[in-house]
Amino acid sequence: MTRRPHRGQAAVEVIAAVPLLIVAALLAWQLVAVLGAAQEAQRRVRADAIRAAGTPGATATTSATVAVPVVLPGMGGLQVTARAAVRTP
């Protein structure tokens, strides 16, 4: 009984794994886009709250909404909202 080497099996496995790797990379990039939008919303709401709370003893509540850039199809319409309340002494 002779054994035949498994030629080309590794190439087939790599070709099968490539679409999975691409999908994983796109999901990771979409997560980066969501985190970037969240940081932008936080920056905007902090700046608005500091501007709004100019009077001593006042409380200012602000919110900001930022659209998330679309990386994956079907992920349109994602938004990140941040809220902050600032009370000046």
Image (cartoon, grey):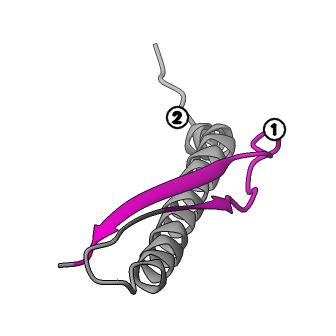
Q: Residue furthest top?
A: 1
Above or below, 77 against 41 in this view is: above
Three-letter residue code for mark 2: Pro
Judging by the rendered image, the residue that carries numbered circle 1 is 74
Quadrant of the rendered structure where residue 73 is?
top right
Instruction: Measure the alpha-carbon separation of dots 1 and 2.
Output: 44 Å
Taking depth in this image into account, of 57 and 43 the one nearest to the observer is 57
User: Looking at the picture, how far across and down is residue 66, in whole percent?
Assistant: 65, 62
In the foreground, 21 or 45: 45
Task: Examine the rendering and report whether any part of residue 5 can be seen.
Answer: yes
Q: Amino acid at mark 1?
A: Gly
Q: Is residue 31 visible?
A: no
Rendered location of residue 27, percent (x, y): 59, 48
Q: Earlier in the sequence, mark 1 or mark 2?
A: 2
Tell whether 82 sits left or right of 88. right
Say what secondary structure mark 1 lies in: loop
Q: Residue at x 47, y 78 (%)?
A: 52
The answer to whether the residues at label 1 and label 2 have Cβ atoms under 8 Å apart is no
Give the residue number, with chain letter if any, for mark 2.
Answer: 5
Image x and y of residue 5, in percent: 52, 34
Q: Residues within 10 Å of mark 2 (few under 14, many from 20)?
A: few
Between marks 1 and 2 in the image, the one whose residue lies nearer the viewer: 1
Q: Is residue 23 above or below residue 68?
A: above
Q: Is residue 63 magenta?
A: yes
* Quarter of the figure with the C terminus: bottom left
Is residue 71 shown left or right of residue 40? right
Chain part drawn in magenta: 62-88
